[in-house]
Amino acid sequence: MKRKINLNEVTAKEPIKVKTQIQSSQVDLPKEEVSKSSPFNLEIEVRRKPVGYDVKGKVTGEVELTCSKCNKKFTHKVEQPFHYELMPTSEIGGGQIKKGDLDIKFSDETVMDLAEVVNEQVLLNLPVKPVCSKECEESTISFSVGEEEQVKEKTEKEVDPRWAKLKELQNKLSEKE
């Protein structure tokens, strides 16, 4: 299993193509978001350009996430094609960022770590608010009029003892008005 690509070996006529599997232990995903993950399959092609490299490929695998609505763990499939330019840091220009600039990565490294490529692509494509199912995505928390009053009464009755004095003061002020 190849883990690194030496960029000095890449030519315009002879790109380097790699199909490999990166173990989940080699990928540094945030544990508070990803409970566990399968090994990731990576297909990557690196081609030299007059300045820099053209990098394209695909990452596939699975991660276990927690639903942001019901808090249930579920499996999320990762099937992410990617394409970007790898440029030397000397090419960083000043000024405004243009639309095409978002597909450029800057680095002066001569070795590309494939585990870092997988890690970056999985992180970029994790859902911001993961949901386990279509039903959970469409569900909303709603109260009927009666339930809303019950919730209001319950919260008014249950005063945290640390705030009791403040609640007494608030009640006295309300009575004076």
Image: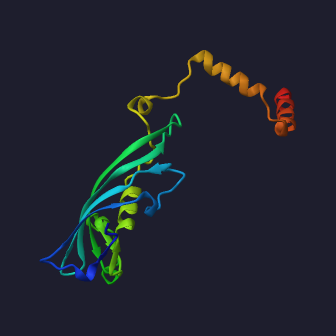
Q: Quadrant of the N terminus?
A: bottom left
Give the color scheme: rainbow, by chain, secondary structure or one colour: rainbow
**Closest to the observer, 23 or 54:** 23
Q: Is residue 91 visible?
A: yes
Does residue 176 appear left or right of residue 87 in this picture?
A: right
Q: Is residue 93 visible?
A: no
Q: Residue at x 47, y 45 (%)?
A: 65
Eyeballing the image, is 16 above or below 133? below
Identify the image quadrant of residue 112. bottom left
Identify the image quadrant of residue 94. bottom left
Picture coordinates of residue 114, whole percent (x, y): 34, 68
Picture coordinates of residue 63, whole percent (x, y): 42, 48
Q: Residue furthest left?
A: 13
Eyeballing the image, is 67 above or below 157? below
Does residue 151 appear left or right of residue 137 in this picture?
A: right
Does residue 69 appear left or right of residue 154 in this picture?
A: left
Q: Quadrant of the C terminus?
A: top right
Q: Residue furthest front?
A: 1
